[in-house]
């Protein structure tokens, strides 16, 4: 039996945050229901195609999945269980935003088997939340957190974001202190990236350029201040018992997110939903980002005789020419070359503080890692950015600080 991670995308949000470039938007309840109906078809379709895989983690992300009616999420989970074999100890996460969660919704999630909650907070400072365009206050987050604990969630992540306009290390320290008092099992602490096409880009693009160039900024924290915030985050969370297991992720022992680790260790993952990406046996697939095309594609799946996809002489399979999914869902299919796989193995693996193992490299590529990267490894070791011990290769603390520089060295 092979294992599979399942990502389920729900693209709907109450309104768009000022910095967000994710595939998310507001939609009425009819569109939401139509979308979920299509999503169920897609889940059923892949469940039938992928019988040799067992699902080990499920992640319902978005968007704001918690904005949807609980019955829709329950129907998604129900369809997953009916369509796939799911491991008994599967980690099953859902993202939620304060202001969209009720006790009844959380109870429904628990009954549906969801055992991990990821709460998008970003900041404990209401001014910062307003500036970000978040729909909620810190007080609403506290209420959500309390409801989640009362509903029996014992594995909670809180998302934080640093590097915000006008933010100082002291201000972010306040946010960290308030969060560690609550004792969530997991904290994700990402740095704001000013993405093109967002309102933040229009407001702060010149400052972002200055920040990147190490110059004095007007509104965003300077590069030095952003670095101070990153180091402070590491320090405060470590002192509170959170291990840093990836550049931006911290967890109490035993609570590192298995779904995320799967991405960084290049496990097979299937993404369903609008714009979702998959990587199955070193082939990447991407779904359309057009919701109407997506719904239409899934509707066609529904009317095609499914058994045709599995018969060896199926005209549909022949037509697919190597796309073993044999569906019309994907807008792109990309077969990863061996070099691309090697690069990914290194730069994704080195995001994790544990790094990569020599044994895994050899098992995957049939040769020692030094056969490909001897000079890179020696060079980074000389710069004290990389450690190579006990069969593992990992970045040093300084290497983590300069992760982009280090990872670029592993590209061909
Ligand atoms: S809640 Fe998340 S996905 Fe939705 S707009 Fe805000 S940042 Fe984007």
Image (tube, helix red, strand yellow):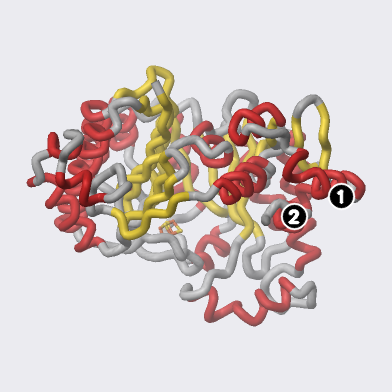
Q: Tell me which residue sits at (34%, 24%) in the image.
A: 86
Residue at left 37%, top 45%?
271
- The C terminus lies in quadrant: bottom right
Q: Is residue 170 visible?
A: no
Looking at the rendering, the quadrant in which ligand 1 lies is bottom left
Nearer to the camera, 40 or 265: 265
Circle 1 sits on which residue? Answer: 379
How much space separates mark 1 and mark 2, taking CA atoms? 10 Å
- Give the side of residue 320 with respect to residue 264, left or right: left
Point out residue 325 in the picture as x, y percentages from the top left corner: 28, 43
**Residue 83: quarter of image:** top left
Q: Which residue is mark 2?
A: 409
Vertical order, 112 against 287 (above or below) = above
Q: Is residue 103 left or right of residue 304?
A: right
| Callouts 1 and 2 close, C-beta under 8 Å | yes
- Number of marks drawn: 2
């Amino acid at each position: 039996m092979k294992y599979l991670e399942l990502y389920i995308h729900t693209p709907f949000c109450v309104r768009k945050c000022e910095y967000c470039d994710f595939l998310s938007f507001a939609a009425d309840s009819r569109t939401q229901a139509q979308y979920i109906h299509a999503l169920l078809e897609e889940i059923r379709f892949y469940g039938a195609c992928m019988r040799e895989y067992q699902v080990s983690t499920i992640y319902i992300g978005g968007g704001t999945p918690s904005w949807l009616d609980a019955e829709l999420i329950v129907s998604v989970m129900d369809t997953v269980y009916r369509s796939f074999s799911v491991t008994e100890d599967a980690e099953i996460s859902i993202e939620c935003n304060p202001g969209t969660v009720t006790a009844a919704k959380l109870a429904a999630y628990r009954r549906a088997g969801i055992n991990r909650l990821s709460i998008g907070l970003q900041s404990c400072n209401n001014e910062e939340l307003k500036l970000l365009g978040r729909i909620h206050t810190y007080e609403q987050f506290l209420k959500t957190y309390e409801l989640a604990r009362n509903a029996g969630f014992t594995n909670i992540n809180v998302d934080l974001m640093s590097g915000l306009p006008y933010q100082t290390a002291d201000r972010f320290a306040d946010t960290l202190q308030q969060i560690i008092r609550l004792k969530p099992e997991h904290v994700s602490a990402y740095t704001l990236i000013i993405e093109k096409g967002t309102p933040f880009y229009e407001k702060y693009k010149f400052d972002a350029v200055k920040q990147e160039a190490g110059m004095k900024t007007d509104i965003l924290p300077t590069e030095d201040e952003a670095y101070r915030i990153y180091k402070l985050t590491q320090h405060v969370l470590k002192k509170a018992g959170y291990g840093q297991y990836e550049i931006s992720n911290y967890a109490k022992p035993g609570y590192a997110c298995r779904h995320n680790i799967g991405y960084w260790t290049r496990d097979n993952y299937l993404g369903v939903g609008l714009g979702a990406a998959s990587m199955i046996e070193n082939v990447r697939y991407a779904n359309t980002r057009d919701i109407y095309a997506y719904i239409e594609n899934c509707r066609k799946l529904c009317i095609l005789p499914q058994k045709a996809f599995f018969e060896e002489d199926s005209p549909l399979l022949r037509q697919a020419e190597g796309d073993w999914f044999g569906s019309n869902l994907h807008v792109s299919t990309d077969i990863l070359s061996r070099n691309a796989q090697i690069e990914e193995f290194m730069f994704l693996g080195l995001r994790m503080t544990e790094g990569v193992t020599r044994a895994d490299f050899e098992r995957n590529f049939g040769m020692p890692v030094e056969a490909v990267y001897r000079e890179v490894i020696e060079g980074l070791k000389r710069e004290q950015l990389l450690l190579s011990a006990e069969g593992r290769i990992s970045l040093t603390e300084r290497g983590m600080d300069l992760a982009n520089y280090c990872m670029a060295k592993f590209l061909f």
